[in-house]
């Protein structure tokens, strides 16, 4: 595996792979790699002849300075994992390399970016669009891989790719979970043992209530039940639980209004750690 820290070096390596006729896959990450990332890489490895993984904690997507400062950084261990996973290039740039000057672009991301994470974390999705558009431009991959834990992020990236005219297959990959159901996340390492012990309840409560969705219980009631059950767990505080259209990401009030499968998206605080998760409610029973 080649570890590259400059955009010029990256472009050169990718150009060589393309000249050899290889399909190029990109897996953007912020490092602190776990089995969830590795599953994206495995998928990319299967589908592409040349796999680039970026490891870059993007400052422009953090609306909370403390979150940026405490975000886990484990570059050496990450590179070992990437080598083991059979990655061709690890792109590990500095902030100055990605942003030689401040990125002042404001993307017209539309309604997909206005709800949930977009409403709670002002500027977050614009920062994601900035960095992913840069990575797309540096690599010009055939395919790019993202995890469905950040379900809304994928819709935002699709919108950015459409706005910028990137002809890239954006591949959404299923959430990878710990054995006890907790969605894998780089932020999990920040949980205290006590918080870690209750964190799987997030997934548990979502799945426990999934049958009610199948029975088409009133959506508002379902939302209230999930929020009440999660808030009843000592140490947890729900920021939001929304049931949204999986394509438009807009909240849906009744099952009859649904045009696509629905997704229940939750954000929960455990102390100062913010975790997100989601569950799909398919339209066809
Ligand atoms: O999902 C993430 O880890 C980040 O938002 C991404 C897509 C790598 C952009 O920084």
Image (cartoon, rainbow, N blue to C red):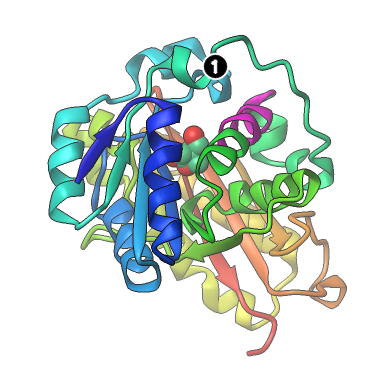
Residue lying furthest front: 19
Q: Nearer the viewer, residue 88 or 126?
A: 88
Give the number of marks.
1
Q: Tell whether 115 sits left or right of 100.
A: right
Q: Which type of secondary structure does the marked residue at label 1 adopt?
A: loop
Residue 105 sits in quarter: top right
Majority secondary structure of magenta residues: helix
Residue 38: x, y in percent? 27, 56
Q: Is residue 80 above or below residue 202?
A: above
As displayed, is residue 250 above or below residue 94? Answer: below
| Quadrant of the image occupied by residue 40 | bottom left
| Place of residue 256 in the rendered image (x, y in percent of width and height, measured from the top left) | 85, 77
Residue extending farthest bottom: 285
Indicate whether residue 126 is drawn in magenta.
yes
**Rendered residue at 45%/48% (across/down):** 15
Query: Where does the magenta region start and end?
Result: 123-132
Q: In the displayed structure, does residue 191 sit left or right of residue 26?
A: left
Horizontal and vertical percent position of residue 210: 53, 72
Q: Is residue 82 above or below residue 133?
A: below
Residue pointed to by mark 1? 99
- Quadrant occupied by the C terminus: bottom right
Which x, y percent locates residue 17?
38, 56
- In percent of the image, x 83 and y 36: which residue is there? 108
Q: Residue at x 67, y 88 (%)?
A: 284
Q: Please name whichever residue, 182 or 70, is drawn nearer the observer in this view of the structure.
A: 70
Residue 260 located within the stretch drawn in magenta: no
In-front residue for pair 38/152: 38
The answer to whether residue 194 shows anywhere in this view is: yes
């Amino acid at each position: 595996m080649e570890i590259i820290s400059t955009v010029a070096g990256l472009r050169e390596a990718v150009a060589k792979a393309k000249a050899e006729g290889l399909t190029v896959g990109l897996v953007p990450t912020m490092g602190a790699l776990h089995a969830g990332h590795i599953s994206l890489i495995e998928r990319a490895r299967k589908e592409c002849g040349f796999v680039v993984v970026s490891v870059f904690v993007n400052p422009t997507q953090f609306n909370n300075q403390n979150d940026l400062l405490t975000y886990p950084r484990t570059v050496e261990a990450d590179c070992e994992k990437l080598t083991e996973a059979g990655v061709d290039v690890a792109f590990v740039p500095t902030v100055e390399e990605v942003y030689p000057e401040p990125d002042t672009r404001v993307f017209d991301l539309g309604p997909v970016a206005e709800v949930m994470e977009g409403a709670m974390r002002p500027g977050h999705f614009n920062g994601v669009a900035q960095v992913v558009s840069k990575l797309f431009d540096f690599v010009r991959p055939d395919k790019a891989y993202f995890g469905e834990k950040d379900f809304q992020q994928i819709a935002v990236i699709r919108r950015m790719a459409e706005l910028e005219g990137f002809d890239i297959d954006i591949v959404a990959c299923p959430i990878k979970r710990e054995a006890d159901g907790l969605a894998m996340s780089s932020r999990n390492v920040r949980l205290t043992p006590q918080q870690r012990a209750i964190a799987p309840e997030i997934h548990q409560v979502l799945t426990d209530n999934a049958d009610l969705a199948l029975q088409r219980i009133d959506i508002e009631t379902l939302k209230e039940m999930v929020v009440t059950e999660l808030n009843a767990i000592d140490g947890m505080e729900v920021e939001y639980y929304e049931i949204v259209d999986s394509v438009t990401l807009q909240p849906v009030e009744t099952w009859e209004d649904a045009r696509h499968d629905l997704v229940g998206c939750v954000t929960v605080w455990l102390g100062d750690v913010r975790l997100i998760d989601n569950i799909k409610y398919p339209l066809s029973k």
